Amino acid sequence: MQIHPETEEYIPWLAKQWTIETDEGAGVQTYTFRLDEHATFSDGQPVRAVDVVASFKHKTLKDRQHPSSYILYREGFEDPIVLDERTVKVRTKSNNWQLFLRFAADMNILPARHATIPGDEYLSKYNWTMIPGSGPYSVRSNGVVRGESVTLERRDDWWAARERWAVGCYNFKEVLFRVIRGGNLEFEMFKKGDLDYYYVSSAERWVRQLPKEGIVTRGWVKMRKVFTHAPVSFSGIVFNLRRAPFSNRNIRLAFAHLFNRERLVSKLFHGQYQLMKSYFPGGRWGNGDRNEVVAFDPLEAEMLLAEAGYTRRDREGVLIDGSGSRLEVTLLYGYQSWEKIWLVMKNDFEKAGVKFILKLIDPSTLAKMVAERQFEVCYYVGGGSRLPDPERQWRSDLAQKPGSANVPGLALDAVDSLCAEYVNSPVRDEQRRIIRELDELLYNAHPYALGWFAGYVRFAFWDRFGHPPSLLTRTGEILPTMMIRTWWFDDDAERRLQRAMADETALPQGETEVRPWE
């Protein structure tokens, strides 16, 4: 199955038919899938029910050394059953609509003959070799150059080429992915024409550098900022609620009021981002249109800290409580380039009487410390997905579990109740209502001092392609996936570009901002 990039509803892929049966008494569901009789892998072999079963077992074998996959599929499902060559049935272990998503849309179907080999052989053999897939592209013979590139070529015999959902899609005959180590090298290669597109992650580069490049001023390269409804990962300063002082909500909210995002966005990020006020930013799911922005407000922070008992300062100007304990916190961070952000933040906090210590550590060490909950505060990026999965990040039973996605350790019965209601609500509109309620609850608990986000995709590309008016899909995937799905090589545009470059003439740049869904 796949999720429609505009409507977010399920549409066919390998399965042309499917049913969902719910046993309310047992609290489980049964899914039955009928595979398309035309479906084949890239080696020409048909896709069969035994391949689906083998792919599931592949996910649940410990010798694959992928524990999260093992837990997710083993805890969610009974073993699938082959009904006939093209039909497979699977029973869930609970009534949770997201299990359908995980089995039908998230589980890659591999040929049984490849998925069933022993784990050590699998990990060795397929480190540099691709397993045959059922999609429109396959890895070209000798298409993997270790450490340098991977080349895909379109299958002339792709079984789904004439399906309604595939019409007009996957137009490139060949796609070359290069391995590039370093953002500056990637940018230089793009400017020379060695890369066709460039994802612009830096506000500085977007605002100050790209517009001055000759390839842009002449219109040979187009700059586009496409506003989508794609969900965005939430991010911000995460508080460790398992220890003082951040077990106190007032202190968390005070710290949020001292996080001067307004100045950071204005001065360092050239006004390119929005202040985050939702744990489900971006798409159409969260409560961001109703939640009030937690603005930079030192006076409000002072009152909140006083309510928490910090009413006096010591000789160094650091706030102390009734027992004389200082309000002191260490922020861990993993990248030197972020230090300019934290120095701004440190200055604001220390003016407010908070001893704010910055500690740069190796990113892998930081990840380990966060997983083991050995931190006070750090900047953290939470998961974002097209269809929210709040259980993974907010269930109370995960609050004390090392390595779980409930990084702050938030444990609220009301959150658990909404998560349980959500997974038992198969209707999209009802799911969105529940997520809005959940988002409001999370937002008012302040487990993070949320940061900033972009409701768009910023990129540049050489003007040799055709594309739909919207350029990208509404709900969004990663940029190259969206381009491969709906763009095409335009011979006329390529000739026009080559003439302009040879004659040193300009092409129209067009509108930089594209807002197709507003």
Image: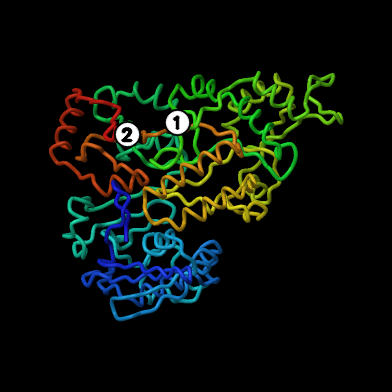
Quadrant of image for the C terminus: top left
Point out residue 348 in the picture as x, y percentages from the top left corner. 65, 21
Distance (Cα) linking label 1 and label 2? 16 Å
**Label 2 Cα neighbours within 10 Å, binned few <14 / some 14-19 / many ≥20:** many
The image's mark for residue 226 is: 2
Point out residue 33 in the picture as x, y percentages from the top left corner. 32, 70
Residue type for callout 1: Ser
Above or below residue 399? Residue 498 is: above
Pointer 1: what residue? Answer: 202
Identify the image quadrant of residue 444.
top right
**Label 1 Cα neighbours within 10 Å, binned few <14 / some 14-19 / many ≥20:** some
Above or below residue 247? Residue 484 is: below
Q: Residue furthest bottom?
A: 84
Element type at marker 2?
Answer: strand
Q: Earlier in the sequence, mark 1 or mark 2?
A: 1
Quadrant of image for the N terminus: bottom left
